[in-house]
Each structure stands twice: as C-alpha cells, then as structure tokens.
Amino acid sequence: MHLQQQQVTGQDRHDTLIQARLVDDNHRGTFLPDMFGTPLFMRGEGLVFAWMRQLVRDYHGGVWMFYTLDNGGFYLAPKAKEPFVLSVAGNGYVGEMSADAAGIVATLFALCQLNHEWVDTDQGDRLADRYHALLAFAAEHAEAGAILSAID
C-alpha cells in the first residue's frame, strides 16, 4: 500500500477536531521512542530532519517542537516564526507554509518511508497507524490544502 496516496474521505472525519498537544520538556526524552518505537526512534528522528533539509532549501537546522495528537498520532515541527518554502521534487509542488505545516509534511514523509522499510511487520503496522492518524489531523489543519498538495 502506498501511504502517500490514501485520501481522507468525509467518512474518515471525526465529529470533533483532532487536538495537538505540545510535549513538555519533562517528556521529550521518552517521546521519540514512544512514537516511532524503541528500535526506530533515532532513525525516525533523523529521517524527519533529513526530509526537512530535502524539502526546504534554506533549512539549516534548529530547535524542534514535539506534538502528540489525541487520535494517537504525533509530529515534529521546527520552532520558527517565518514560513518555509517547500519544494517536492516527486510531485512538482512548490509553496510556502508555516513551520508547523512543514513539520507535518516532513513527519508524514518520514513515517511513510519507515513504513515501507518495515512493511509486513508489527512495527510497520504501527507506523502506518501513526501515518494515518497524522494524515487525519493534516486534513483538518488550517493549511490542509498546502500540506495535502505537498504529499500528493
């Protein structure tokens, strides 16, 4: 299954909006192992950063914020006030979006890549669930159009 091409339909929508919560400093140490799984948390974090470097030409690192979603998903986003210009070579998307939206895109690409590496395993199933939870949140995000166009 190619995760990036799955559409979120009206039937998949929640009656209430999915809420994101910033992970506080006391829980940052356990966040990545909890979300990516203990064997993959370093690779998962590295992939999110690598995707951001690939998607945003002017990105050169920085502080990242971690978010949990009340539907079981999560994402990472750079702490930045300025918007980013993303360019996705695979689909021709070029557009500006907030750091929050750019982090969602980078996390979706990282989850998709990890899922393909761990397909047909329990870990792969868990990653697919996390991907779809984040995709549902992305579909409700204020910048949903840009996010969904970037991952199309």
Image: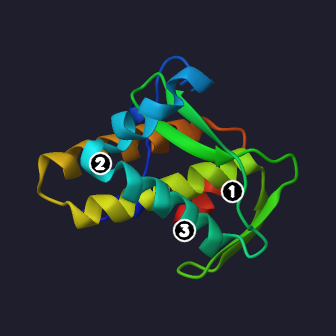
| Nearer to me, 64 or 128 | 64
Please name the residue that numbered disc 2 is placed on.
128
Tell whether label 3 touches label 1 (CB within 8 Å): no
Please name the residue that numbered disc 1 is placed on.
146
Q: Which mark is residue 5?
A: none
Q: In the picture provided, is 58 more to the left or to the right than 134?
A: right
> Which quarter of the figure is the N terminus placed in?
bottom left
- Please, what is the three-letter code of the amino acid marked with disc 1? Ala
Task: Report x, y in % for residue 71.
Answer: 42, 25
Please name the residue that numbered disc 3 is placed on.
50
| Nearer to me, 36 or 131 | 36
Q: Dividing the picture into quarters, in which one does residue 58 lie?
A: bottom right
| Nearer to me, 86 or 23 | 23
Q: Nearer the viewer, mark 1 or mark 3?
A: 3
Residue at (53% x, 80% y) in the render: 90
| Nearer to me, 40 or 141 | 40
> Under tag 3, what secondary structure?
helix
In this rendering, the count of numbered labels is 3
Q: Is residue 22 visible?
A: no
Q: In the picture provided, is 19 more to the left or to the right than 80?
A: left
- Please, what is the three-letter code of the amino acid marked with disc 2? Ala
